[in-house]
Amino acid sequence: MKFTWFNLMPWPHLPEDFRQTHRSVWVDIDSRLYDPAEGNRVYHEYMDQLEYADSLGFDGIGVNEHHQNAYGLMPSPNIIAAGLARRTSRAAIAVIGNSIALYNPPIRVAEEFAMLDVISGGRLVAGFPVGTPMDTNFCYGQIPALTRDKYYEAHELIMRAWREPEPFAFDGKYNQLRYVNCWPRPIQKPHPPIYIPGGGSIETWDFCVEHDYNYSYLSYGGYKAGKALLDGYWERVAALGKDESPYRASFAQVVCVADTDADAEKLYAEHVLYFYNRCLHVYLGFADPPGYRTVKTIQSGKLNQFRAENQRLFTSLSWKELVDGGYVIAGSPATVRERMEHMIKDLRLGAVFLLFMIGNMPDDKVRHSTKLFAEKVMPQLRDIWPEWKQDDRFWVKPLETRVRPELPRNGR
C-alpha cells in the first residue's frame, strides 16, 4: 500500500455564518475574507506539515490545483511542490495535479513537471485532472462542452513532448506550435507515474485503463458511498481486458486518529464540521454547468458531489453521521486500522490520499493525528496486497544518487 499525506490547504477563517451570508466558497467568494498577512503564516504551517509527514515515513506528500476559493489555497501547486522538493528527499511529491485543459499552451505543464521531477530526483507523481467546472469553466473561462476535447489534446502534446527525442511541430485543434522541444526532460522514463483524479466520469475511467494510469476518486462522500463508483471502474478494467492490480485505483479519505474513539470526537469534530458546512458550500450554478458532463456520464446516472441534495446534507450532518456513514474514518488507532482495512479491500485500492488537515484544524491536532497514524496504523496496512508487491508501474522510481538537500554537500 502507498499512503500519501495530502493537504488541500483550506482557508481556516471563514465566519460561522458563512453559509447564510455568502453565496459560494468558490469563484465569487468575497476577497475581503482573505488576509495576506495571516496567509503568510498559514502557507508555512501547511508546508511544515507536509515536510513533517515526509519525516514520519509517508510514501507521498500531496498537493493540488484550485482557483478563486477558500476551499484550497493552491492556484499553483507547482510552487508548493518546488518548495517541498528542496526540503525533502524521500517521499514522492504527488501533484494531483495540473488542470491541463486550462493551460495555453499546455507545454508549460510538461516543462514545469519535468523541472519538478529533476529537482526532486525522480519523485514526481504527475496528476492530470480534467478539473472542476468552478476552476476550468468559471475561473479560467473554458467552454464546458469543449473542456474534455481540449484535455485530450493537451495530454497528447505533453506526452509527446516528454517522449519524442527530436523537436517536432504540433498542429492541433487548439494548439499550434512550430517547435516543441521540452527542456529539461523528466528523470523518470518513459514519464512520471500519471494519476487522474476524477469524480465519476465514464470517459475518465476508460482513459485511465487504456493508458495504464491510476484512477484517483476524490470525493467527500466517504468510502461507503464510493463503493458503487469504484465497482463501476473495476468493471471497466475487466471489460477492457486489463489486469486487476490494486495500484490502478486510489481514493481520498478524511482520517482522524486519537487515543480513543471518544477523544476523536472531542478533538476533531468541530474542525471536520467546519469543512463540511463551510468549505463545501458551492453555488449550484457553478457546480454543474450545461455541457460539462458527457452524455455517457449522464446516462450512467453518475452525479456531481456538489449537487443540491448533498449541499443540504452537508449542512446537517452530525459527527456520528459522518463517522457511521463513512464520510470520515475516525477513532482510536485500532478503530481506524479496522475501517481502513475494510475500505482498502472493499474498494480494491493500492493507494490512499489521506486528509488529516481538514477545515480549520490547528497544527498540534493535525500532527497528533498524523503521528498516531504513522506509528500505529500505517505499518499494519502495508502488506494488504502481497500478490501485487512487485508491481511498481504506478509509483515513482527516484534516482539512488539524487541530491539530498538536508545533507551537507561540498564540505558545506
Image (spheres, rainbow, N blue to C red):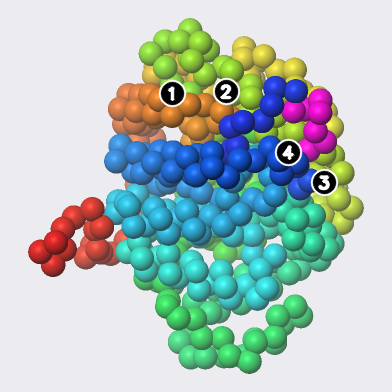
Which of the 4 quarters of the picture holds residue 191?
bottom left
Q: Which residue is mark 4?
A: 25
Camera-nearest residue between 273 and 156:
273
Q: How far apart in space, not on screen, are marks 2 and 3 (Cα)?
A: 25 Å
Name the spot of residue 196 as percent of width and height, x first.
Answer: 59, 55
Circle 3: element type: helix
Q: Earlier in the sequence, mark 2 or mark 4?
A: 4
Q: Earlier in the sequence, mark 1 or mark 3?
A: 3
Amino acid type for the residue under numbered disc 1: Lys
Name the spot of residue 223 as percent of width and height, x first.
Answer: 60, 30
Q: How far apart in space, not on screen, are marks 2 and 4 (Cα)?
A: 17 Å
Q: Is residue 137 above or below residue 257?
A: below
Q: Are marks 1 and 2 in contact (CB under 8 Å)?
A: yes
Q: How far apart in space, not on screen, are marks 1 and 3 (Cα)?
A: 33 Å
Camera-nearest residue between 23 and 188:
23
Magenta stretch bounds: 18-26
User: Image check: 5 left or right of 222?
Assistant: left
Q: How far apart in space, not on screen, are marks 1 and 2 (Cα)?
A: 10 Å
Q: Residue at x 62, y 72 (%)?
A: 106
Q: Earlier in the sequence, mark 4 or mark 1?
A: 4
